[in-house]
Every structure is written in structure tokens, then in C-alpha cells.
Image (cartoon, grey):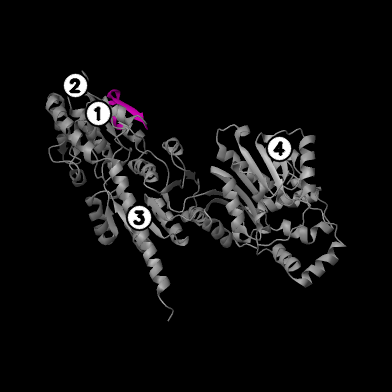
Amino acid sequence: MKPSRPYHSSTAYHREPGGLRRLDFFVDRIDKWRRSRDPSTIRILDVGCGNGNIALPLARIGYTVTGADIDEMSIANAQQSAEDLQLDSATFVVSSLNRMSEVLFDVIIASEVLEHQKDPVTFLAEIARHLAPGGLFLLSVPNGKSLEERIRRFTTHTSVGRWIKARMKRVILQQDVQSAVKNPHEQFFSLRALRSLLFANGWRVYDVRPAAAIFKEFYYLVGRLCIRRGSRMFHSLDAFDDACVRRLPLSVADGWLIEAKRFDPSRPLVLQILPMLASGGAERLVYDISVRLIAEGFDVEVIAILRGGPLEPLFRGSIPLTILNVRGLFGISAIRALVRIMRCEHPAIVHTHLFGADVWGRIAAWIARVPVIVSTEHNINVEHGWLHRRVKGWLVPLTTRFIAPADAVKRNMVAREYIPARKITIIPNGIDMTRVRVRSPHGFHDVPRCITVGRLVPQKGYAVLFKALALVKSPWILEVIGSGPLEHALQAITERLRIDSRIHWMGTREDVPERLAVSDVFLSPSRWEGFGLALLEAAAAGLPCIASDLPVFHEFLAKDDVTFVEPGNVPSFAHAIAAILHDPFSSIARARVVGERLRKINSVDVSARAYAVLYQELLKKSADNKSSRLLVPDS
């Protein structure tokens, strides 16, 4: 490729096949990792820096870079280039990694160095010793099964090959862009062997990209006899190779570009997979559970398959988050992307939520041989037809355990989706007590403030609520918090009922606890629910509630805790609203008692602890099963 970025002028990598692709990968990963930190505060070590073709561009960007190499000539060339470019933030030393001082670096780069190590395990341990906590390790490694590497192994590790290589050197004038040192390759890695080596030595791989397709092999084998480095043809073929490599399987690439970080083997990695980060109860539960699982001894990463959403800023501030932004025919692209992540990161548990992520995530986890696969059913999915249930049935054998938030959901899973009851564990949803804002005991406002929270979808029954409110003669206003596909249709209904002036459409909000605390009545007209987290939060805040009489609500609320009405019954709902507005004080007193009780027993901390206990149980069972299989003698 031709130089196109400002820092490309500080490197000779445009004269090496795939060189700029490799450099850009390192720069982009460091930039993503540092976020808003000042580049000058980030210390980078370039191991085996050669002539400084990586260190110099990074220094030009503003990073503080140290380049280390055992070849004095390469270091002298790099130091001279730094002086010519007036890059004071670049320092070059003649040293191997194990001889360097105990200085910690934020980022360490080892570009085509690992394959030269006779003892790669010791080398990786030295990298870990010099990397600051939370630091980034970037490396490029050639594909040991490529034609170029097979020939290299023959010419460096056999007597006949060394003889042929000596004769060829007399014909071909070698020009090594990176380093003047001609150390032989000691290791020839496959992708699986490389991932296994890194994982076994405490490195979790977060990304793998192909380094080049075939141009590098072609050039070093025969191309340099007729193509001059840096020529127009050279750049054109290199650019074509860059376009091709994006579409090739990783296993056939000429080499790999890898992003890795240290991890604690005692902390299992849990991948929580969602379709998107909408503002629903499932997404909020995943966030609340994930941040607490970290304190329970797990590493957690959240993956959104289709896109982000309103809760994206919340997740990004607390939990490692990956948004794939993929979709395609039958989710094939999503499955491929998830498999690549799982094979890189070696999760101990994959936990999927909501239908799309349930299907694609579980298939990907099975392909990637994840030991424990968990799925949570968040709702009683009345709208799911035969095909949805059939797909779920096909995935039952792939699933280690299902989680239901309530007994009503479990019964539905057994009866309609034919999931064995023994594979279902009930873990009730909890609420984040730090977010609860308790309503003061004062009476209602002069114009009572009603509130409802939920997605604007048929399940929530908002049409029934609006028709009931139209029958209430007392003054009231209603805040509707949430968004969804029925928003315009529901607004049209309120206009026809002539109550649109009293409906405040609030959209998705982050201050729901504050809005509940200043409201007077919570309304929940749902047709069905898997748990009813919004109702639980409102009741825990001490807010008088009117809700559809659904069996799932009775699993955490007694019959007299809130006012229950028949689902879909407009006159009953209207009568309940009118009654509570006419006599608010008894409802307020009752709501305060209910709220105090719920705040003691329905904390999300309890739910997170239950998830942690279940995860540990499943991991232990998986490990025991694996040990049993290993102990069974071959017949």
C-alpha cells in the first residue's frame, strides 16, 4: 500500500509487503486502548525494533517509545533516524528483553519476534514482567504452515536446505527492511498452537487479524527478482493483497496480528451476549449482574451483536463491551464473528439473552467448544410461534443450563418449549438498591402524577391503559417512559380519546428512579410478563401501584400489596385508578410498608450471588466430566 497516514512518512514499512497493514493495526489498537489518555504519558516498548519502523511512527504520534534490539547496526540506524526526524520521545537501546531494567511499560510490541525464540514460554514471562497492570501486548507472528515458512524451515533446519540457501544468496541480494540480523526462525506456529501457547501462559487474546494474504510469500520467494521495493507495481500488488486478506479465513493467512492482555487464570471469563443494548429489563439486568459478578471473582465481557443502544454509555463506563454491528442471512455473519471471539478469548461460560442472541450465541459457543453454555428466558413469549419454539427445541441439547426469573416462566418453558425441568434454575431478578429513591410520605399532587415504564409494544397493554384513563373523571397526568415500535400508533389513540394533552411521552430515560420518587401512582397494564422488574422497582420505591393480575407478580407481591385488576379489562382498570385517586392516603401507607419489605429481600446483590454460585457449580461439573472422560481407558 502507498503511505496515506501522516506517520507513514516516518517508516520504511511501505517497502515491505504487508508492512503498513501491520503498523496501522498496532497504531489503531493502541489508540483504542488508551481512550482519552495523553499519548505522551503512555510508555511503549518495541521488542526487536530493528531499524525503528514501528517505534519511529509511534514517537511521531506522541507516544514515549523505547526500542530494543540485540543488533547494534539496527539500533544505530534507528537512533540516527530519530535524530534526523527530531523525535526526542524515541529511545533505542542494544539489549535483549531479559537484560532490560525493571521499568514497566503500558504497551509492549513484539513484531515477528516470537518465532525467533528458542524458549517462547520464558519470552512471554519476560513480557509479562515488563508490562504494567492492565497493559496491552501486541504481536505479529508468521503462519508456520505457509509456503514461505515451510521453505524457511527447510533452508534453516536441514543441511541440504542450508547449502541451497548459501548458493541462492550469491544470486539474490537480500534487502531486509526490518533488521540487519538474520536469526533463523526457531518456532513455526499454527493459529491454534499460537492461541494455546498464549492462553496457557496467562495471555487472553482479544483480537486476531490476518497480516497478509499471498503477496508477501510471492515477493520473498520470486517477486523480488522482477519487482523493485516501493515501486508502483509493488504498492499496487500490496494494496490488492490487503483487499484480499480481509476475505480470507485466518488459517490460510500469511501471518497474524494479535492483541492480547494478561488475565488471572483463577477468574473465569463470562461472555454475556445480547442482540442490542436497548432500555429493556433484560439489558438492565445483564448490566446489574455483570458489574457484581466481577466482585464475585469472574471476568465479564458483554457482546451486543446487532448494534448498541440507549444503555451503551452505561455499559462502556463499567464493563468491557464489544459491539459487532453484524447481521446477515440466518445470522451466519453473527455466528462467525462470535466464534472468532470465543476462540480468541477462551471463555469459561457463554450466557445468552433474548431470542437472536440465544440462537446465534449458543450455536457459536457450541462450535467454539465453550465448556458451559447458559441461557436466560426473560419473558413468557406468548407471541412466539411454532418456528421459534422449534428452533429453541433444537438448541436444548447444546445448553448446559436454562435460567428463569420466576416459576411462571419455568412452567411456560416446560409446557410450551419442551425444555426439561431439571435443566431450568429459577433465579429471581433483583433491583439495584443504590438506585432506589424512596417516595416521600406526602399526599398526591394537586394534579396526581401517574407514571408507567416499559417498551411500547403490544405486550405492555398501553391501549387498555389509555382507554381506562379516558374514563377517569378526576384530574391526572401520565408520564410514559419508554420507546418502541407502537409509539406513533399509541399517540394516535390518545388523540382520538382526547387525552393527548395529559400524556407526557418521556422516551428512554436514565433517571427512572428519580421520576418514580416524584410520582403518585404507578400503572402496569401488561398482558403478560416474565417477571415485571418495572413494577418491582416502583413498589420498592414505596409508590402506590395498580397492575394487571398476572401470576408472575404474585411471586414477589402479596394479593393486597398493590391493586390488581383483570388484564385487558378497561372498566376495572378505570375503577381502580379512580378509587386510588379518591382515597390516596391508605394506598400511600400500604405502599410504604410494601416498599420497606421489598428493599430487604429483592436486592440484585442476592441475584448476582445466585448467578455466581450457579456458574461455579456448572464449571465444577464440567471439569469433573472432562476428568472422567480422560480417565476412561480406550477400548
What secondary structure is marked by label 1? loop
Residue 439 place in picture, x, y as percent: 23, 26
Distance in Å between CA atoms under marks 4 and 3: 47 Å
State left or right for residue 203 relative to residue 396.
right
The tally of labels here is 4
The residue where tag 3 is placed is 616
What secondary structure is marked by label 4? strand
Magenta span: 492-508
Residue for point 80% across, 61% down:
222
Distance in Å between CA atoms under marks 4 and 1: 57 Å
Task: Answer with the quarter of the image where residue 616 lies.
Answer: bottom left
Sequence-earlier tag: 2 or 3: 2
Q: Which mark is residue 90?
A: 4
Q: Which mark is residue 438?
A: 1
Residue 203 place in picture, x, y as percent: 53, 52
Distance in Å between CA atoms under marks 2 and 3: 46 Å
The residue where tag 2 is placed is 442
Report if residue 533 is visible in the image.
yes
Tell me whether circle 2 and circle 4 mark residues in contact (CB < 8 Å).
no
What secondary structure is marked by label 3? helix
Q: Nearer the viewer, residue 22 or 451?
A: 22
Residue lying farthest to the right in this orientation? 170
Amino acid type at mark 3: Gln
Distance in Å between CA atoms under marks 1 and 3: 35 Å
